[in-house]
Image (cartoon, coloured by chain):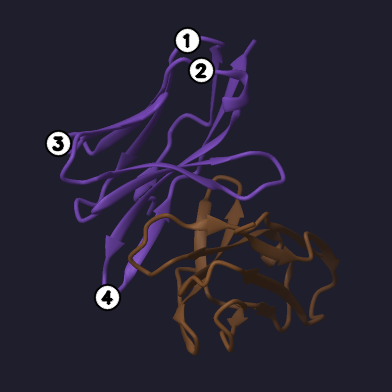
Amino acid sequence: EAQVTQNPRYLITVTGKKLTVTCSQNMNHEYMSWYRQDPGLGLRQIYYSMNVEVTDKGDVPEGYKVSRKEKRNFPLILESPSPNQTSLYFCASSLKVSSYEQYFGPGTRLTVT
Amino acid sequence: DQQVKQNSPSLSVQEGRISILNCDYTNSMFDYFLWYKKYPAEGPTFLISISSIKDKNEDGRFTVFLNKSAKHLSLHIVPSQPGDSAVYFCAARVYSGTYKYIFGTGTRLKVLA
């Protein structure tokens, strides 16, 4: 089944404790992206990757890191999480950067206390 | 600044009637407009798109209308079904060195049986 998977689905952590949210897709997509969803703000792009070893900042990259060492995986790293990073995170992928149809993972709800 | 706005946070419609979800935008450089549907605890799924050079696109019960002069698009669902109850996100694509996607804040549709 073609899908985007994210782990963990739920995470409660404390300020400053490094964490990684994994994202994997099995569709051989070139383009992958991370979004956060906050009440009243819609989905905002954090980082994106057009292919292996090619990543760039989205609209809200502060406090996040990403890497793209393999085509299928695009982990999101929070090296020192803060409470303002409490949010619902979605990973998405599409065939190419120009493909407007994105496939989203199920989401990761992160709470930073 | 919110370039894509969904001014109605929620909408209730009787089963069998028409649902109309609205979206306004400010950037005349958007080249594609998209609608995504999101169920609770799942990621958004692509529903329908429309190119900026078209004024209508239809897919089964779903039709999207684009009024460029008013910078307004709408999604019509006819007839509405209880399974359509979800949050609907409007999104737009713009090219600025790379393709970027701007999402609205979503409208929660409830179809009453």
Q: Earlier in the sequence, mark 4 or mark 3?
A: 3
For the residue pair A58 and A98, the one nearer the viewer reads as A98
User: Residue at position x 59%, y 76% from top?
Assistant: A72
Give the CA separation, mark 1 to mark 4.
Answer: 43 Å
- Report helix, strand or loop for mark 1: loop
Identity of the amino acid at label 3? Ser
- Which residue is tagged 2? B80
Chain at numbered mark 2: B
Q: Earlier in the sequence, mark 1 or mark 4?
A: 1
User: Residue at position x 67%, y 47% from top?
Assistant: B42
Chain identifier of the brown chain: A
**Are the residues at dot 1 and dot 4 in contact (C-beta closer than 8 Å)?**
no
| Other-residue count near label 2 (Cα within 10 Å), few / some / many at <14 / 14–19 / ≥20 | many
Q: Earlier in the sequence, mark 3 or mark 2?
A: 3
Q: Earlier in the sequence, mark 3 or mark 1?
A: 1
Q: Same chain for marks 1 and 2?
A: yes
Identity of the amino acid at label 2? Ser
- Which residue is tagged 1? B17
Give the CA separation, mark 1 to mark 2.
Answer: 6 Å
User: Residue at position x 40%, y 27% from top?
Assistant: B60
| Other-residue count near label 4 (Cα within 10 Å), few / some / many at <14 / 14–19 / ≥20 | few
Chain at numbered mark 3: B
Q: Which mark is residue B97?
A: 4
Residue B23 relative to residue A38: left or right = left
Q: Position of residue B73 (x, y in %)?
A: 30, 34
